[in-house]
Image (cartoon, rainbow, N blue to C red):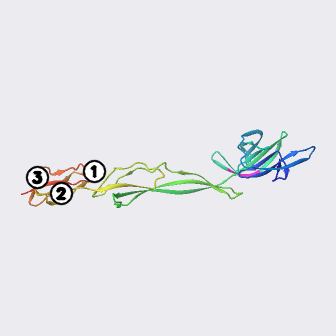
Amino acid sequence: MYSYKTKKLVTSGVLVADEVQEFEQVKVLVGHMYHRTKRRFKVIDPYRNGPLEKESLELRDDRGNVLGEMPCQSIPHGHVIVIPTIFSKNDEYYTLKEITTLLRDDKKATIAKYELAQVTESLDKTTLTTRFVTKTGQQLCRAAKQTITWKTLKYRDAKTSRSWSGSSIPEESNYVAVKSPLIMGYVAQTAGLGPASLKAKEQQIVYQKLGKIIAIDNDGNILGTKKYCNDRTDPTQAAETFLPYIKGYHRAIKAEAILPSDPSCDIFVKYLAD
């Protein structure tokens, strides 16, 4: 085949990754004569027909150490080796420095030499905000924020100035659980939230107003009210609350205090005139 890159007849070629080369099929005549058929083709995807054993590519670092080997790949009317511009081994990145061809045991050996990419480290942060709100979205206290730091290694090819980033690694696998704080006059619908995914940006814990004791007379008239007390050990419950004192009246029940089963619901207590 005739190579438009080298302007010569070739039976094999070397491509750097992402490169496209154009060839033309030729018909060999007597002696050194040949006829160009004008049937052109481009080498774009050399991996489609699988590897051949004719020749291989050695990947070496700039100290001569062998990093690996790339097998030759078949293409129409010949074979080709694709040389990666970036090569990774043992969590290190190498960038292509030069390509040489040696004659070894009457066979050609293509050697690609690499050097370590320049590495810098960057730190990024993501934040999860937990808000403590009512059902209508009213914020009751300052939001709690958690911050996770991510470390990203950034690489640069000194020869081409090409740069790329490696994987970002977080310092923690998730955000920690959040406990519902005690907010006076309110009761939380949940004791807290479990560990959150690092993809989460915001979450909320909803609170309701504490219920109250409503003192009424025989006719249902309201004589007074008293809000339940917060349970200081459990933000989801109300504490035992003493019944209110109403001047000129006494309770129709013997109990002096009640423990609400539903901390957000009111309780009516009848009072009788003295």
**Closer to us: 76 or 145:** 76
Q: Is residue 68 magenta?
A: no
Q: Seen in the image, is 250 located left or right of residue 16? A: left
Q: Distance between the residues labelled 2 and 1?
A: 19 Å
Q: Earlier in the sequence, mark 3 or mark 2?
A: 2
Q: Where is residue 167 in the image (x, y as percent from the top left)?
A: 58, 51
Q: Is residue 96 magenta?
A: yes
Q: Which of marks 1 and 3 is nearer the N terminus?
A: 1
Q: Under tag 2, what secondary structure?
A: strand
Q: From this view, report whether residue 76 is shown above or below residue 270.
A: above
The numbered disc on residue 214 is 2
**What span is in magenta?**
94-98
Q: Quadrant of the C terminus?
A: bottom left
Which residue corresponds to mark 1? 237
The numbered disc on residue 252 is 3
> Within 10 angstroms of label 3, few (less than 14), some, or many (20 or more) residues?
few
The numbered disc on residue 143 is none
| Residue drawn 31% across the image and 57% down it | 183
| Residue drawn 72% across the image and 51% down it | 96
Residue type for callout 1: Gln
**Closer to us: 64 or 259:** 259
Q: Position of residue 187 (x, y in %)?
A: 29, 54
